[in-house]
Image (cartoon, rainbow, N blue to C red):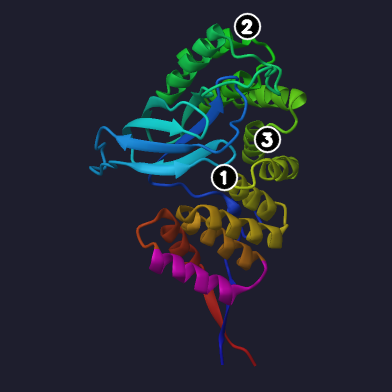
Amino acid sequence: MGVRWNWVATGVLAGAFFGAAGSAEAQLRVTVRETSGGMLSDEATVRLTSTSTGMSGVAVTAKEVRTNGGEAMIDVWPGEYVVEAEATGYQRAIAHANVQGGTPTELRMYLSPMKKAAGEGEPASGVVMTPALKKEMDKASSALAEKDLGEARKHLTKALQLAPSNPEALYLLGVVEYTDKNTVAARKDFEEVLARYPEHGGSLLMLGQIRLEAGEKEEAVPLLEKAVEANPGKWLAHELLAYAYARTGQLEKGLTEAKKTVELNKEREPSMRLLEAKILLRQQKGGDAHALLESIVGDFPESSQAKEAKDLLGRMRPVGPKP
């Protein structure tokens, strides 16, 4: 007869039980836009070339990814990178990024169209990217990539003085405040963007993340659902929504979003397997959870998720064969 496994420690019902696990690598988030600040007519190809080995001693000579919804989240080792972005119908752009651990390094890149159609009007946002505005946005983007938050804030403030309705500048200012751990100011910035542009995917995602981290799980769910609708191919939106569903008791939905996250980004599999195991424990499916936790330890032995899986396994006990 089979052996059933039961959860014997407290805390399975607590929201913190579904906390996100960290990653050992650094992350670079590249956002590619037209010089007007609007979305490209097609997705861009982003290519990274390492110019240093970093502390890991591992050099990435080249790494190429395709943006989704105008963004690409790239897992890399900390270090210096040359970043190239190109898309059909646009001139290629080159930037430099100093990627560090911890909070993802942000890099904004702007591509100029090869040629403009006659009679082309203003972009959908109603913001025209004047040379002065582009200069401030470029300087802010470079400063943010270098994690010089004070310099980025200065240039974004100037950009907003030039174009108060520029959603990208206000969104980036929110990113700066969030990175600087000023979540009150960041929340205000993202809310202001959404008041003007309710479908702004980046602001939906960031405000949803802020509310989830603040314990406002019920309020986070609709924001993250809209973020997924705005950018269905963005794995981070699905991952945050998976945690939000888990914390609000929508367990089957949480499992669905966790699986979707892995479909979009295989590197998130250890974290999502751990989340799935916790959901199974919450559903009183101890045997399935036990098997999944063991698979994490076996498949990803050096990961932080394996360490937590071992801890959870140590807090489970068999209750004997089924009658």
- Asked if disc 1 and disc 2 are in contact, CB closer than 8 Å, the reply is no
Element class at badge 2? helix
* Alpha-carbon span between mark 1 and mark 2: 32 Å
Can residue 240 be seen by looking at this rendering? yes
Q: Within the image, what quadrant is residue 256 found in?
A: bottom right
Residue 301 lies, in percent from the top left, at 36, 62
Find disc 3 in the rendering and name its residue.
204
Q: Amino acid at mark 2?
A: Gln
Against 241, is 81 above or below?
Answer: above
Residue 6 lies, in percent from the top left, at 59, 74
Find disc 1 in the rendering and name its residue.
236
State which quarter of the image contains the C terminus: bottom right
Q: Is residue 286 magenta?
A: yes
Foreground residue, 148 or 200? 200
Q: Is residue 158 magenta?
A: no
Counting residues from the start of the chain, the first of labels 1 and 2 encountered is: 2
Q: Residues within 10 Å of mark 2 (few under 14, many from 20)?
A: few
Residue at image coords 56%, 7%: 158
Magenta highlight: main SS: helix
Q: Within the image, what quadrant is residue 302 found in?
A: bottom left
Find disc 2 in the rendering and name its residue.
161
Q: Which residues are magenta?
A: 283-299
- Asked if disc 1 and disc 3 are in contact, CB closer than 8 Å, the reply is no
